Image: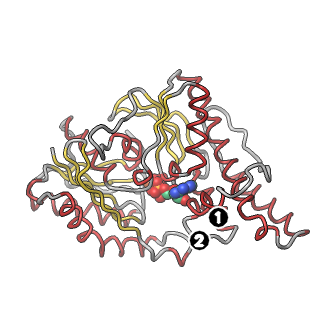
Amino acid sequence: VTILGIESSCDDTSAAVIRDQLLLSNVISSQDVHKQYGGVVPELASRAHQANIIPVVDTALRNAGVTIAEIDAIAYTRGPGLLGSLLVGASFAKGAALTLGVPIISVNHLQGHVLSHFIKDEPNAIHPSFPFLCLLVSGGHTQIMLVRGPMDMEIVGQTIDDAAGEAFDKCAKVLGLPYPGGPVIDKLAAEGNPGFIKFAKPNIPDLDFSFSGLKTSFLYTLRDKLYTEPNFVNEHLPDICASLQQTIIEILLSKVEQAVRKYRIKEIAIAGGVAANSGLRNALQLLGQKRGWKVYLPKKQFTTDNAAMIAIVGYYSYLEGKTSPLDEPPLARLPLG
Ligand code: ATP
Ligand code: FE
């Protein structure tokens, strides 16, 4: 089965081709227009998707060495995401499917992040066995999923306010760092002392998360320091980043430990943009060794938004005969399942 995947939920235009689970190509065009605004501007994102979508699909097919006539189905992101951005990918997918006479498969973006673990970019790539727990940490979501099968996953805990990626990005903004802040903090943190400052950690029951208090604690701690040391941020930037990152990691991993205890599952995966964070990857790896878990870290190119993860969901849906009607609209909010 050959699937063309299309992802356009936020500010990356991406197309990928997979044959069964094997990845043939994955092209991602990231939009630079948003950098000067310090965040994604929805209208500009839609326009950039429109300019990019055809060349990106064209390049994905060429890189895969596949003609459009060989595509069996087109999988696209139905949501969640920015509506204008989603509409570009959805409209393209539907138009192309209609012309080619192939089915479309609408995909939940979050299911895509989780199933990114099943993309085979090399024939003997490994993946988690079912059931496993997946910590999904991205720009808009932070949740723990209990994954029983490719098409069977349940949210067992989630953030009650901000996402982990948002915490990285907003704190980076406070520090005057460019958008998106996550990767910049990751780099700076590598040179810093994670025990330099202690930020407040939330006390949230069960497997839920909260990050809005951390954001406030971060802001006030720096403000108070700046009264007495005007150069505090400049002089201690790596230490501040390392301390912030450490706090986020501790919040995330304490809930993973709790989830392992509750479900007695020791296959642990992470997914989403924040899964690219080197501090989180190292800390989870170490914790896994200590506790006897099997830990799965996705390759970095599959953590942030990409169409390969959409294509792989398309593949599993196709196997189950699940295709989608053409009149199904994209949705900015799309719950899983
Ligand atoms: P969602 O998937 O929830 O709809 P999204 O698609 O915008 O949101 P992703 O593309 O999965 O989110 O991830 C983007 C987020 O990942 C941003 O918040 C970014 O700062 C963060 N991120 C990317 N790389 C890193 C890193 N190395 N360390 C920390 N955060 C990172
Ligand atoms: Fe995403």
**Count of numbered badges drawn on the protein:** 2
Q: Image check: 199 left or right of 4?
A: right
Q: Residue furthest right?
A: 228
Query: Where on the picture, by quarter, is residue 122?
Result: top left
Image: 288 above or below 263: below
Identify the residue position indicated by label 1 in the image. 172
Query: If the image is split into quadrants, where does the N terminus sit?
Result: top left
Residue 146 point in image, percent of width and height: 46, 31
Do labels 1 and 2 touch, CB within 8 Å? yes
Residue drawn at x 68%, y 58% as measured from the top left? 191
Q: Is residue 151 above or below residue 80?
A: above
**Element under disc 2:** loop
Q: CA distance from mark 1 to mark 2?
A: 7 Å
Residue 50 horizontal side relative to residue 218, left or right: left
Q: Position of residue 320 (x, y in %)?
A: 21, 34
- The amino acid marked with disc number 2 is Pro
Would residue 248 be found to the left or right of residue 156 on screen?
Answer: right
Q: Is mark 1 within 8 Å of ligand 1?
A: yes
Q: Secondary structure at mark 1?
A: helix
**Residue holding disc 2:** 178
Q: Are there few (<14), some (14-19), or many (20+) residues within 10 Å of tag 2?
A: some
x and y percent of residue 199 in the render?
77, 50
Crowd tier of the residue under label 1, counting other residues whose Cα lies within 10 Å: few below 14, some 14–19, many 20 or above: many
Q: Nearer the viewer, residue 49 or 222?
A: 222
In the image, residue 239 lies at what x, y percent? Answer: 74, 58
User: Which residue is more in the foreground, 317 or 84?
Assistant: 317
